[in-house]
Image (tube, rainbow, N blue to C red):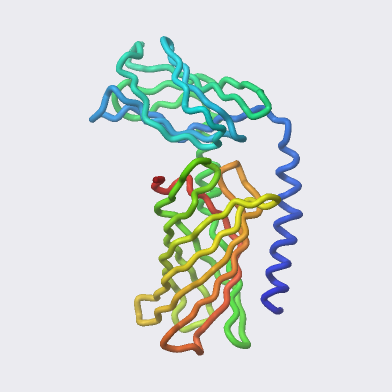
Amino acid sequence: MKPISVFLFLLLVSSTTFGLSFRSEEGDSIEVILIEAYSPKESPGKMVLTFFTSEPVKAEVIFSNKTVPLGTEFNESYSTTLEISDIPVTEGMIVFYIRVQGESGQINLSEQFDIVAEGNTTISGGADLTGCLIGSAVYAIPAVYYNFHRDSSGLGFGKEFPLVSFFSGGYNYPNGYIAFEYTYTDLNDIKSRYNFGYKQIIEMPYINYVSLGFSFSTDFRGGNAVLPEASLGLFRIMNVFTLYVRGSHYVFPGDRDKNMTQLSLGLFSAFFSFQR
């Protein structure tokens, strides 16, 4: 099967399967999924708060004695540190809610959350814990690769881990990110490869984004290569992950006979990276 045929097949499958499932969720209330909320022992007057929502919203945190707006833009992901030294503490706990307003004007109030005034997180409500566990499971899903080397081809798998993401303005996608990627394939003598590179993201209408990247690839045994690539971000999953289709080409400067083309289908999220 030619590379372009495989690419079109992956694109068709992802369009039909995931596109239908997302449209079925329209009309639901705005969901707030809490990732972390805690007061660090070294900074007891602060609260670290991270959460995401099912659509772009303006958000504010409601305490018993004050309300704290989290900006004026519509975002799907929030990560901030709040001053809580003036918040009343009841039996060692601080109670708060998150109120969100969607772009349509719809307003939703989260369930009650509470944290230990100093120390680790205590989250009330199983829905958010379940959402966090589901998100972690989705994040762990590996990418699937189809590799072409001369007259041979074969499947592989791997995972890309964004390390540092660079944001400006909107918060849907970073402008770019630095990533580490592990891949495994049966085509060459060296099965495992490790890629380090930078990817630039351009948000686009009709699809989520186009990404162009360049990486350095090594097997730590002398098999070094450079790796130009292009990706299409197709659909969002849980409003945190994006299904992508990517085309890459390994160029081995010292041995062109090893050059290899790779198509992949995987999930991208910058949510778990260090954000700047």
Nearer to me, 112 or 150: 150
Q: Residue at x 73, y 31 (%)?
A: 27
Q: Residue at x 63, y 28 (%)?
A: 102
Q: How many labels, in total?
A: 0
The x and y percentages for residue 56 are 59, 34
Instruction: Pick out the residue farthest to the front.
Output: 169
User: Quick check: 90 above or below 160?
Assistant: above
Examine the image and state in which quarter residue 224 appears.
bottom left
| Quadrant showing the N terminus | bottom right
The x and y percentages for residue 168 are 47, 44
Nearer to me, 70 or 30: 70
Nearer to me, 129 or 87: 87
User: Quick check: 275 above or below 94?
Assistant: below
Q: Residue at x 49, y 22 (%)?
A: 60
Question: Does residue 104 appear to the left or right of 228 in the view shown?
Answer: right
The x and y percentages for residue 105 are 66, 23
The x and y percentages for residue 70 are 47, 27
User: Quick check: 2 above or below 264?
Assistant: below
| Quadrant showing the C terminus | top left
Question: Does residue 257 appear to the left or right of 239 in the view shown?
Answer: left
Question: Does residue 15 appear to the left or right of 55 in the view shown?
Answer: right
